[in-house]
Image (cartoon, rainbow, N blue to C red):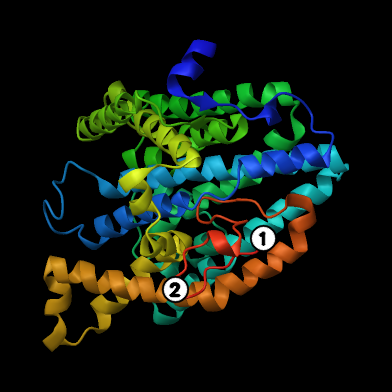
Amino acid sequence: MGWAASWAGIGVGSSRRGVFTSEQTLARDRALERYQPQFDGLRALAVLTVMVDHFSADVPNFPLPDWIRLGATGVRLFLVLSGYFITASLRRARDRMDASRLSIGKTMAAFYWRRLLRIGPAYFVFAGIALLLNLGAIRHYWPWVFTGTVDWLIALNNEWPLAISHLWSICVQEQFYLFWPLLILLLPRRWVLSAIVAVAFAGIAFRIGCVIFSAPIIARWVLPFGSLDSLAAGAALGWWGGRLRASRGGWVIALLCLSMLIVAAVLRNSDPTKLKSVLVEPLEAGAFVILVARTATGFDGNIARFLSNAGLMFAGRISYGLYIYHILVAMVFNRWMPSQMRFLITIPSLRLLVFGIATLFTAALSWRFLEQPINRLRGEKTRKALGPIPDGSWEQEGATRSQRPPHLIFSADSSG
């Protein structure tokens, strides 16, 4: 493996080489994996592709040709990021358990508490507003929404319910989080990476089974088993601590990633009943793992300036709100926009602009007055067990004030 790591420039952190026994080692690991602001830019790109796809779904070949499925690709990036951040968080939680002799019960309780306080508030505010306004199918399917099982609802009905269908990916991630700490925190360290690889292959095997037994395409997409390989791909990187450094052969790696995404796009537009269609997700996940590994190190030059742009970074920090509320915003405009102003939502380019600005404003308000205060609360409650570390695909914690973008609409603090 040495020659491969040398060629790719992947550095492996020392946390996988043995059990942590000192705070000095923990401090070194935290310094190695400090807050990387470019992840906020990457997260923003993921959510913006989904928003553009949803806001222009009824317009052929706009803003890009239909064979480029922006929404599907953006969701895949989110899943890889989610697996990466959650597993890195759990690995560091395990390191603290070993170093400080924290109990497994307290560590797992802290993890689940953090997840509930991170995902729950905006999720339930969205659900409450949608119920109050009677948007889409939420009053008919509200039990599925409040139990976090919208993905199973979609699979069983084989259709996308209005107003709530976008919640499927959040439900998939939350269901993944229920069992993932058991694997990362309880398995012997020497078995963890093998178990992660097995989970990835289980996801591929599930999709192969769906093709063989002619399962509905929607079920294959939304059920949690179909996302296991993407989540596990990010998780493997998060556990292993791999980083991709800049090198003279960087253009080769960039070309490889682009080629993988193009092949995945071609296969996604081919016959979904053929076995080759199961390669779409692994190809996209593989490309995004390389991208995440490179982002962990930090890009230089124009790419660094682009991903570190203050506006893009702020969009990344409120990306969860952008995702949760964007369908709500679109449905409210569609229902209540005055007839004399409906041209703003019927002209595709204007619609993207209006819906985008309104969603950004809504998500920013949610971040400032709902999510940020609760983030501080959960940080105070769980800092000892998990520390100020990244714990989800929708956020990046642990940044010092000096590391955060300065000129934002609202303060983007997140203390824990």
Q: Which image quadrant is residue 335 in?
A: bottom left
Kind of residue at badge 2: Ala
Which residue is identified by label 2? Answer: 364
Front residue (pair 352, 257): 257
| SS state under label 2 | helix
Which residue does the image show at 26% across and 28% down from the upper left? 259
Q: Determine whether, in the image, residue 202 is placed left or right of residue 93.
A: left
- Asked whether residue 98 is in view, the answer is yes
Which residue is identified by label 1? Answer: 416
- Counting from the top left corner in percent of width and height, residue 320 is at 47, 61
- Counting from the top left corner in percent of width and height, residue 222 is at 41, 44
Q: Determine whether, in the image, residue 50 is placed left or right of residue 343.
A: right
In 3D space, how far apart are the residues under numbered discs 1 and 2 (Cα atoms)? Answer: 19 Å
Q: Which image quadrant is residue 355 in?
A: bottom left
Kind of residue at badge 1: Gly
Neighbor class of circle 1 (other Cα within 10 Å; few <14, some 14-19, many 20+) is many
Q: Determine whether, in the image, residue 331 is placed left or right of residue 2.
A: left
